[in-house]
Image: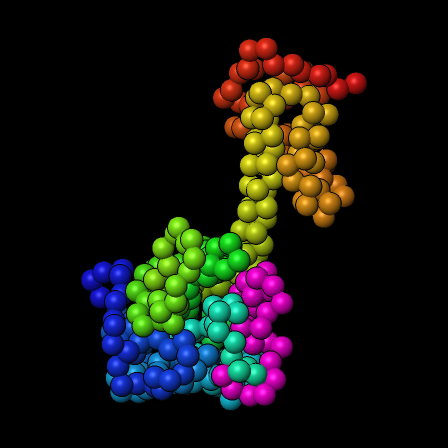
Amino acid sequence: MDSSILSFPDRGPWGNSSYRGNCSGHVYRELFQALKPRSFCDPMMGSGTSVEVAEEMGISAHGLDLRLGFNAVSDSILAAIGHHVDLTLSHPPYGAMIRYSGSCWGTEPHPDDLSWCESEEAFHEKLQMVLLNQREATLAGGHYGTIIGDRRYDGRYVSYQAEAIARMPSDELVAVLIKCQHNVQSSRKAYAAMRLPRIAHEYVLIWQKRQRQTFELLKCLAVQAGGRLRDTWRAIVHMCLVQLGGHASLVDIYEAVRAAADDRCASNRHWQAKVRQILNQSHDWFEPTDRGVWKLKRSGVVPGGKVRHAA
């Protein structure tokens, strides 16, 4: 593999070509040749393309799937296969783009089928559970990953790969590959007044498992999540101060933050304390000029700007 771009118009002879959402077997061949696993597991094998390619290449392969009774969200991959493997790779549904249980197979939707999640947030959360499950089944030094696309619908663009990367250990991510999509049903449809191009790519995300205990992993994820939350609040406060001319009283900052981020304020009854914490701890961003008055560290007061001092 000498490029981060993968393009295979031909899916090859592996698996079942009529099974919706199939990935080309040539993609798996490229990945297996690059990563050289001796053992492999696909917890969402679909029609079995990945397993067939692995077995053809002499790799010990394990295929699991919800339609066969294995739940990658709540059942342990490690317990199901009985030992750690060098590589675990999944190809989950892309949200509700294709419904699987109750449509492609079975008579009723399965509650843990990722194509039937009640919201995008629920999908992101369940995919994270699947990836952590894969990680647990992977040998230290081995690789785990997923093949995932993005989705545009109802005027929204949902980046599943961005969420997956954000929710997994940042120090374990080793590769993001772009996979060109070929022969998809959406390419045969006409969309009225569509200004942006169709999504014609997917991602192959690869992480390498580091040697760490479970509590260390959870601490790492908690630090990442806390850092994102802190950075989001800081960005909100910064934006509000910019709109206030770069210099404002705490009272005005509160009012601006409530107007700009009412949803966050509603979900955190201590949001005013959070704003004060951000102002007091972000020394490179904000500085006090008087009691209850703050300014941007690298910005002066806009000429004519008014500052109302807190009582």
Q: Quadrant of residue 34?
A: bottom left
Looking at the image, is 136 positioned above or below residue 234? below
x then y, percent, for residue 36: 28, 74
Residue 148 visible in the displayed image: yes
Q: In which quarter of the image is the C terminus?
A: top right
Point out the residue furthest to the top here: 304
The residue depicted at 69 percent of the width and 25 percent of the height is: 252
x then y, percent, for residue 121: 59, 60
Q: In which quarter of the image is the N terminus?
A: bottom left
x then y, percent, for residue 277: 66, 34
The residue depicted at 59 percent of the width and 69 percent of the height is: 117
182 vs 204, nearest the viewer: 182
Point out the residue furthest to the right here: 311
Magenta highlight range: 104-129
Decide if residue 59 is on the left or right side of residue 263: left
Decide if residue 154 is on the left or right side of residue 55: right
Looking at the image, is 98 positioned above or below residue 190? below
216 vs 22, nearest the viewer: 22
